[in-house]
Image: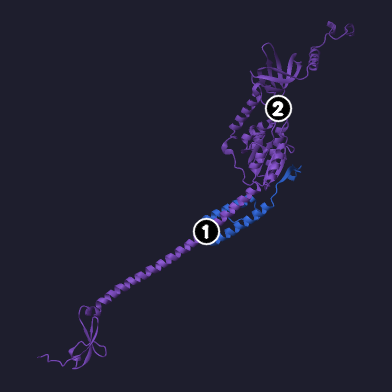
Amino acid sequence: MAAKRPRGLTFEERVARLEEIASELDTETVDLAKALSLFEEGIEHLRSAAAELATAEATVQKLVERADGTFGVTDAE
Amino acid sequence: MPSYVSSATYPGETAEAAIAVSTLTETARDILEGAFIPIWVRGEITDFKAHRNGHWYFCLRDTASQIRCVVWNRDQRRIPAPPDDGMLVAAFGRLTVYPARGEMQFTIVRIEAEGDGLRRKALEVTRSRLAADGLLAPERKRALPRFPRVIAVVTSPDGAALHDIVAVIRRRRANVRLVVVPAAVQGDGAPDELCYALDQVNRWRGADLVIVSRGGGSREDMWAFNNERVARALAACYAPTISAVGHEVDLSICDLVADHRAPTPSAAAETATHSQVELEIELRRAAHRLNASIAAKFAAERDHLRHAARDLVAAGVRQTSVRRASIERISGRLHALSPLATMARGYSVARGNDGRALTSIDQFTPEMPFDLVLRDGTVPAKAWPRSDPAV
């Protein structure tokens, strides 16, 4: 699959991409240059995911339906 | 007619003062309704009919008596299922008179069947209808997202369930956003509100996991989660669903329809989210795998290189030995032709001072020194005066 940009992914997508990268590295057809670029991408995902975890905090909000049928969320507390 | 009226002291006292039938029945109704507050009556159901106008008609009887009963369409929502003939029930209602027939009628708003028969019947009916539509099939169950980002929680905003769920995700420092979609979780309006909330979730589409939940309570309190419309709304949810209604022992129709059943609201939160520690472990695992994979890749490349080097050396050795073999072949032939080989067999060669072979007697003069070359060395020699070959 085409390499995704590391930014803007969810934690789950990052972990999934990391698994994908590891599997790709495990195939014999990947040449060394490609393997290195995959590895670098993986490291970037690891860093971003770890940074996201470090600031993780559960938030609680409430769904609000507006008169025009669109939705918004407000803080629950 | 004024004279009739004036002769009677109350309506109906005399033939002249006779009252209309409807006056009689309506008066009787007023008196009956005034005399009886709403009460529970025990009896057996007979002649049950669900009329096409939506109302239920039947009789309640015991060994000696019976009374006609009605449940108006609008009052049926509090009754889990229509009763069957032969069921022993307690019915709550008000005694009245049906003026059109001049009959006593018990207008019922609640029915409790012996052995919870109505609820069991309702559950069986709902369950079989959902099963017939394939909504309970195990292959319909979807896997829950491993790391949900946004979880919609359909529940009462003031209920114990939400409190428990929030407490769990806070304690676990789960990397998640809870979005509460408020709905009444008990009472007459609960099924409608739950359906509406689930419909909102479906139109919003902002969550990647949906939890429907309420805390423990009486069976009646939790009845909305056995409602067929609620179950169908839950089944229609675009995202995977967790049902967490009441306590471990409470099993609702929603539990059967949801992709995952959690025994309690807290358990739903535990199932849905990972703690920060778990996520860190997950990341470390991913990092380890990545490192192992790149290391394996390098090892494989090194192996390739090593193999290539070995192949190269082997090829060199092969080429050398081929050449060596041909050199040996040629040297064999040379050896066979060499005069040294002849000398090895016992012959010798005479050589002059100039190193040329002396191959004829004409090349010798008396007293001429020459070398005699033998197999294992050279012997200095001198020619003697030649005897006449003719002699």
Q: The residue under label 2 is which amino acid type?
A: Arg
Q: Are marks 2 and 1 in contact (CB under 8 Å)?
A: no
* In this view, the mark in front (2 or 1): 1
Image spot of residue B204 (x, y percent): 69, 43
Query: Do marks 2 and 1 share a chain?
Result: yes
Look at the image and give the colour of chain B: purple
Which residue is denoted by mark 2 in the rendering?
A: B77
Image spot of residue B227 (x, y percent): 67, 31
B302 w.r.t. B4: above or below: below
Q: Is residue B251 left or right of residue B371?
A: right
Do we see residue B51 in this rendering? no
Which residue is denoted by mark 1 in the rendering?
A: B297
Look at the image and give the colour of chain A: blue
Give the crowd class for mark 1: few <14, some 14-19, many >=20 residues within 10 Å: many
Which image quadrant: the C terminus of chain B? bottom left
The image quadrant that residue B239 belongs to is: top right
Image spot of residue A60 (x, y percent): 72, 44
Give the crowd class for mark 2: few <14, some 14-19, many >=20 residues within 10 Å: few
